[in-house]
Amino acid sequence: MSVLIETEGHEQVKVRSAADVRRQWKMVGLFALVALALVWFYFQIDDPTVTYLLDNARGEEPRELNAHVVVIAGLVVTLVALALAVLNLIPNGWPTILAAALVGLAFLLGFLVWNYADQTGSSFAMVNPLPGTVKYAVPLVFGALAGCLCERAGVINIAIEGQFLMAAFWASVVASFAGAAEWGLVGGIAAGVAMGALLAVFAMRYLVNQVVLGVVLIALATGLTDFLLSQIPTDPEIRSRLNNPETLAPVPDAGIPFLSSVADALSGLPVIGPTIFDQTLLAYLMYVSIFVVAFLIFQTRWGLRVRSVGEHPKAADTVGLKVNRLRWQAVLLGGAFAGLGGAYFTVGSNGAFASNMSAGNGFIALAAVIMGRWHPIYASLAALFFGLMTTLSSQLEFLGKVPSSFLTALPYLATIIAVAGLVGRVRPPAADGEPYVKS
């Protein structure tokens, strides 16, 4: 942050802080690396003709674009941003975010056309990754919202992975028994809230170290779901009643009164339609949940009280707030959102529950919370970024230019880089992880 200093002649001089200088040169270094990468992409492309599909699901004919033009356009954008960063003409805040987003988009498009170029004789066409991004981001967003609620109240929630596992199992069982995927969402919410209650009891009643507690709860969920899965008989008829749920259909095809007809009409919009509207009910709940949580935390009296017990619980207690009651409420509400995220793995996508099927997504959701600076909207954007990395890893695996093992690790590598390098220093709520005992 720049500060104004008044000299003896009563002139005000703006002095940049060390943090501003570090931020500037981090941007310069990042933008320079992107520019070099785009130059390399340009010279590595021999045949610049690339075919692409904006909407693969609707059977449209592939179109063509020139990969060299795309790379040069991205390079121009990057060089302009680099020059502005060198001259310190990009203010902190939204201008920085916008500049980084544009450079990131330039790199992404350059990376994609480089991968799909020179595929002579191949039927591969560049597919719009945005619908898959939203699909893969659904559990991450719900997990990030759970983390924001818990940690804004001062309770560290390492156990999102465990909540995902328990919710996925019980969503499958309840949906199989009830014969409807929608009931699986209820089972997932109940399991997520139950895990949240365990977190709250041991963190606030027995004052257990919250990081250790989160790891223990993950181990508990992993072992318990594996045990319960092993107890389901192998008889196909019994298994179909306990672990063979229906999955949620996309909303345009789900037959939901009014909503399905509106979604069907909107899903025909180019690019945005299949990305936003041709999704399941869980994705629609995700859209609503992001703004509901942001409104609760920042625009309601309850949210102000939750933030106060996460920052300074003793001061909150002094003015008459029930610190642990508010923390209980936030943790249980977060458990409900984590339960919806866990239900995605069964009734939202794969169907039957399998051992450890959340596959570390709870930890990525936790990273999204940190990358998003404990803000529900920013954390959701970070979750969408990780969803994009997962989508790209699945789309580019068959092209052969990047090793498949690297692409498999790409979402996790992006998580490490984003949290450790791009975000910089972040400050969690001051009382995060500190139990409060009224003196």
Image: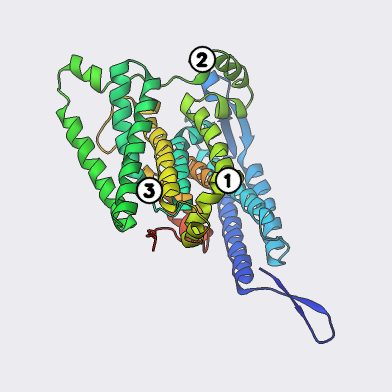
| Up/down of 252 relative to 2, above or below | above
Residue 344 as seen in the image, left or right of residue 162 = right
In the structure shown, which secondary structural element does the residue marked by tag 3 occupy?
Answer: helix
Quadrant the N terminus occupies? bottom right
Residue 419 pos. (x, y %) = 47, 56
In this view, the mark in front (1 or 3): 1
Q: Which amino acid does the dot numbered 1 rest on?
A: Arg
Local SS, label 2 = loop
Q: Residue at x 47, y 40 (%)?
A: 141
Tell me whether the residue at label 1 lies in contact with that at label 3, contact meaning CB atoms closer than 8 angstroms. no
Question: Any mark on residue 256, and which?
Answer: 2
Residue 397 occupies quadrant: top left
Amino acid residing under circle 2: Ile
Residue carrying label 1? 301
Disc 2 crowd rating (10 Å Cα; few below 14, some 14-19, many 20+) is: few
Q: CA distance from mark 2 to mark 1?
A: 34 Å
Q: Which residue in the structure is indicated by mark 3?
A: 363
User: What's the CA distance linking mark 1 and mark 3?
Assistant: 30 Å
Does residue 90 appear to the left or right of 188 in the view shown? right
Q: Is residue 185 above or below residue 86?
A: above
Of the two numbered discs 3 and 2 in the rendering, the one whose residue sits closer to the viewer: 2
Q: Position of residue 265 (x, y in %)?
A: 62, 17
**Quarter of the figure that contains the C terminus:** bottom left
Q: Which mark is residue 277?
A: none
Among numbered discs 2 and 1, the one appearing first in the sequence: 2
Label 1 secondary element: helix
How many numbered circles are shown? 3
In the image shown, does 69 or 348 lie closer to the viewer?
A: 348
Q: Amino acid at mark 3?
A: Phe
Query: Which residue is nearer to you in this view: 302 or 143?
Result: 302
Mark nearest the camera among 2 and 1 is 1
